[in-house]
Amino acid sequence: MSVNVRIPTILRTYTDGRAEVTAEGATLAEVIESLEKNHPGIAARVLDDQGKLRRFVNVYVNDDDVRFEDGLRTATPDGAGVSIIPAVAGG
């Protein structure tokens, strides 16, 4: 399955400045694996040392927050949009 992944500004150094890239995978875990293969270093910014989504990184498949779906097992159908959004803190 081919999906479009929207990359936040802070991670664009891994994608040669591109705001959107394509990746392959039937699940979010496979998509992140595909991203890492084509853009080394990006997975470490999305996943923690245990291979789970980092606490302050939100990921959406289409409009669904994967934390309320199946996490890394969330299905990524062909043509889906995946958004990686770092949490912003401040006051």
Image (cartoon, rainbow, N blue to C red):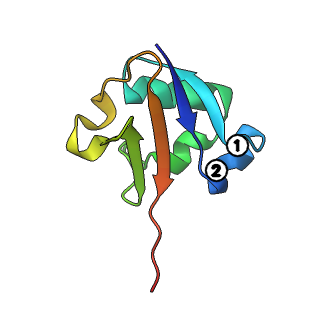
Residue drawn 62% across and 25% down? Answer: 37
Residue drawn 48% across and 53% down? Answer: 85
Looking at the image, can residue 50 be seen?
Answer: yes
Residue drawn 63% across and 41% down? Answer: 41
Residue located beneath label 1 in the image: 14
The vertical placement of 7 against 29, above or below, is below
Q: Quadrant of residue 20?
A: top right
Q: Mark 1 belongs to which amino acid?
A: Tyr
Q: Mark 2 belongs to which amino acid?
A: Leu
Tell me the quadrant of the picture where the C terminus can be found.
Answer: bottom left
Which of the two residues, 42 or 8, is positioned nearer the viewer here? Answer: 8
Residue drawn 70% across and 43% down? Answer: 14
Which of the two residues, 89 or 79, is positioned nearer the viewer here? Answer: 79
Q: Quadrant of residue 55?
A: bottom left
Residue located beneath label 2 in the image: 11
Q: Is residue 70 left or right of residue 72?
A: left
Q: Residues within 10 Å of mark 1 (few under 14, many from 20)?
A: some
Across the whole image, how many numbered discs are drawn on residues? 2
Which of the two residues, 43 or 77, is positioned nearer the viewer here? Answer: 77
Could you tell me residue 47's position as x and y percent? Answer: 44, 45
